[in-house]
Image (cartoon, rainbow, N blue to C red):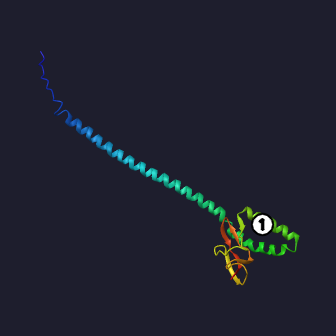
Amino acid sequence: MAKKQKIKYISECSEAEGPKEKKTGGLRRKLKECQKERREYLTQTQKAVADLINYRKRQELASEEWRKYGQRELLENLLPVIDALSAGAGKDAGLKKIKEQLEKVLIRNGLKEIAALGEKFNPEFHEAVDMAEAKEASWTIIAEIQKGYLLHNKVLRPSKVRVAK
């Protein structure tokens, strides 16, 4: 006959939790480390996405600025042509028509004349080349010597003016 083996019961409070607790404790620690690492990666990713969005916005603004002011040099070179056409337009109807057509094209591209005559002198928009005695108030523009122009509300060329003393 077979010998009966004695069955030993291990108390649930003593040795049974020891190795089990070590295993789960290690897993919990690793889980916490992974969660911390995940939060760090998530934060880094969110920062990278925000940086990318800001970069795109800056590039859109820069390209818009470039589009607006990229033609600045061309328009500056056309200003003497406009001045010459203005001088000759009073005598020749053909030149007057050409001047008007050119002005329409320039206006569509953001060019605008600076108001000067009768205005108060503003050094941002006007360049005083002469001062004269006049019945107008001091620093009032009494004559415009050369027209000034704005390109999208930035000064392309200031008006050259004569002001009252």
Vertical side of 85 occupied by 3: above or below = above
Which of these two is toward me, 61 or 49?
61
Count of residue discs: 1
Which of these two is toward me, 56 or 148?
148
User: Which quadrant of the rendered structure holds the N terminus?
Assistant: top left
Q: Is residue 43 left or right of residue 129?
A: left
The residue located at (36%, 48%) in the rendering is 37
Residue 126 picture quarter = bottom right
Residue 125 locus on image (x, y percent):
66, 73
User: Which quadrant of the rendered structure holds the C terminus?
Assistant: bottom right
Q: Label 1 is placed on what type of residue?
A: Glu
As helix, strand or loop, the secondary structure at mark 1 comes to helix
Residue 135 picture quarter = bottom right
Q: Is residue 95 left or right of residue 64?
A: right
The residue located at (17%, 32%) in the rendering is 13
Residue 154 picture quarter = bottom right
Q: Residues within 10 Å of mark 1 (few under 14, many from 20)?
A: some
Vertical side of 20 occupied by 164: above or below = below
Residue 102 locus on image (x, y percent):
79, 66
Q: Which residue is mark 1?
A: 103
Residue 96 locus on image (x, y percent):
84, 69
The residue located at (66%, 63%) in the rendering is 68
Which of these two is toward me, 66 or 89?
89
